[in-house]
């Protein structure tokens, strides 16, 4: 990898400051109620909506974030937040009858949606594995291994490869497999596959089991074969039928730049020379595609598009975070200064427009001009804490920059 230039030390300093003084304290102070339950929704102006379900994805992402923070800096307050998330995950969220984790709970912690959304099951592996690395908690690692076995047994699609989107509470067939109301009811999706890949990468690092390595290698290979599409330029298709026919001609610029670096991390974990070479080429091609087609002149990543160009020009918080890491990874792989510039500009946009200097954390969604959308519930996606608004993307971006850029340059 190319050695980062001295100019990156300022990026590291600013992102570490945002992590330590903004993102982590916000979530430590506001994510949990005094009784240990997750909050419902917290708005931009810090009002709380309590009568909403609690989602396992948010709980697992909080666990991952504070475990990862504690691995870098084992402050008691970061570990305390992780313990709260773990207590919910391994308590009310865990399905002790069928295995795995419920998709959502009511505010009084009863099952709300007991389905097994494989995307969410993968995030529990990701969070539990990171907690094990931070604390040495072997019970957490054992639970992560258990979820791996359940996914492999029930969700792996044996005929055409890959993994099914969702299953019923007892891991049986499910008619409506959508991850959210915005998604297609398709049996396979890039989004779910990407986060299984991410989870298995993390698991393999701490549990070098031959089955995990084979599953990760197979998944990365089939993604490169079936999900990554060359026309009109390299990108990831989004939704598929069982036989990998694409069901939607849209591109997600945020998922493409996120995939570019997560693919590379997976290939490094598998450590197969041919797969590494192929993945490097794909990672750089995906980064180039977003660089050429998915960025606004201000450096922000737009939401989605198709062969004609951008369609939804909103600027969501998480693609900006992923762009910082994705473009920095591409620069470290290929030494292209345009990738480095794109990483720095993505942070500049986030720092100026997305970071909320008044109330803390990051705004969720801005319009193309950089104006924050009206607060929840007037705009459903506009919130500081909610089922999809979490600390994982932006905290991880900060942690990745800290990991990749040496202190002092």
Image (spheres, rainbow, N blue to C red):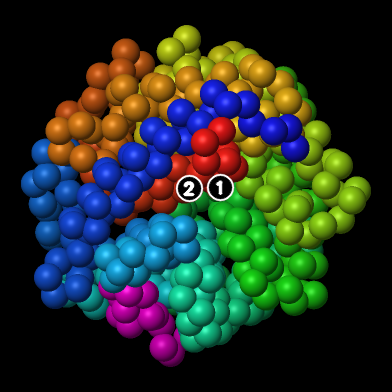
The answer to whether residue 315 is above or below residue 154 is above
Say which quadrant the N terminus sits in.
top right
When the figure is inspected, residue 150 is found, relative to residue 77, above or below; the finding is below
* Label 1 SS: helix
Rounded to the nearest whole Å, what is the CA distance between mark 2 and mark 1?
A: 6 Å
Residue 303 visible in the shown view: no
Q: Which residues are magenta?
A: 83-98
Mark drawn on residue 403: 1
Viewer-side residue, 4 vs 358: 4
Name the residue: 13% across, 60% down. 51
Residue 327: name its quadrant.
top right
Q: Is residue 254 magenta?
A: no
Res 398 quadrant in image: top left
| Circle 2 SS class | helix
Which residue sits at x=75%, y=28%? 334
Magenta stretch encompasses residue 97: yes
Give the position of the C terminus as an image quadrant: top right
Instruction: Reply above or below: 385 against 63.
Output: above
Q: Disc number at residue 399?
A: 2
Q: Is residue 300 something that shows in the picture?
A: yes
Q: Is residue 153 left or right of residue 138?
A: right
Q: Position of residue 390 (x, y in %)?
A: 34, 50
* Residue at the extreme right: 274
> Which numbered circle lies on residue 322?
none
For the residues bearing labels 2 and 1, Cβ distance under 8 angstroms: yes
In percent of the image, x 82 and y 57: which residue is there? 271
- Identify the residue at the far top of this view: 297
Task: Farthest residue to the left: give it.
Answer: 47
Residue under the image location 48 percent in, 70 percent down: 134
Within 10 Å of disc 2 (Cα), the crowding (few <14, some 14-19, many 20+) is: many
Q: Is residue 51 left or right of residue 157?
A: left
Count of numbered badges drawn on the protein? 2
């Amino acid at each position: 990898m190319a050695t980062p230039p001295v100019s990156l030390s300022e990026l590291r300093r600013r992102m570490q400051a945002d992590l330590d003084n903004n993102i982590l304290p916000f979530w430590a102070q506001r994510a949990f109620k005094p009784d240990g339950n997750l909050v419902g929704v917290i708005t931009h102006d810090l009002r709380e909506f309590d009568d909403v379900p609690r989602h396992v994805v948010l709980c697992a992402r909080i666990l991952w974030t504070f475990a990862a923070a504690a691995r870098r800096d084992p402050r008691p307050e970061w570990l305390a937040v992780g313990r709260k998330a773990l207590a919910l995950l391994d308590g009310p969220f865990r399905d002790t009858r069928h295995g795995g984790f419920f998709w959502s709970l009511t505010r009084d912690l009863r099952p709300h949606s007991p389905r097994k959304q494989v995307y969410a099951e993968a995030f529990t592996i990701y969070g539990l594995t990171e907690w094990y690395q931070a604390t040495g908690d072997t019970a957490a690692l054992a639970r992560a291994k258990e979820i791996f076995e359940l996914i492999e047994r029930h969700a792996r699609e044996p005929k055409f490869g890959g993994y099914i989107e969702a299953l019923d509470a007892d891991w049986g067939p499910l008619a409506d497999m959508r991850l959210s109301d915005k998604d297609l009811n398709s049996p396979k999706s890039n989004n779910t596959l990407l986060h299984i890949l991410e989870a298995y990468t993390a698991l393999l690092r701490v549990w070098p089991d031959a089955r995990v390595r084979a599953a990760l290698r197979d998944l990365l290979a089939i993604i490169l074969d079936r999900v990554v599409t060359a026309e009109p330029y390299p990108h990831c298709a989004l939704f598929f039928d069982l036989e990998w026919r694409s069901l939607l001609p849209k591109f997600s610029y945020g998922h493409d730049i996120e995939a570019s670096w997560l693919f590379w991390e997976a290939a490094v974990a598998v450590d197969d020379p041919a797969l590494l070479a192929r993945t490097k080429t794909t990672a750089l091609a995906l980064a180039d595609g977003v660089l050429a087609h998915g960025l606004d002149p201000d450096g922000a990543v737009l939401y989605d598009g198709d062969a004609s160009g951008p369609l939804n020009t909103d600027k969501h918080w998480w693609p900006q975070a992923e762009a910082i890491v994705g473009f920095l990874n591409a620069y470290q792989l290929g030494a292209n200064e345009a990738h480095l510039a794109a990483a720095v500009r993505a942070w500049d946009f986030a720092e100026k427009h997305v970071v909320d200097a008044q109330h803390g954390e990051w705004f969720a969604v801005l319009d193309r001009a950089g104006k924050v959308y009206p607060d929840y519930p007037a705009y459903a996606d506009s919130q500081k804490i909610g089922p999809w608004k979490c600390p994982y993307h932006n905290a991880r971006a900060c942690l990745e920059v800290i990991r990749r850029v040496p202190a002092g340059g």
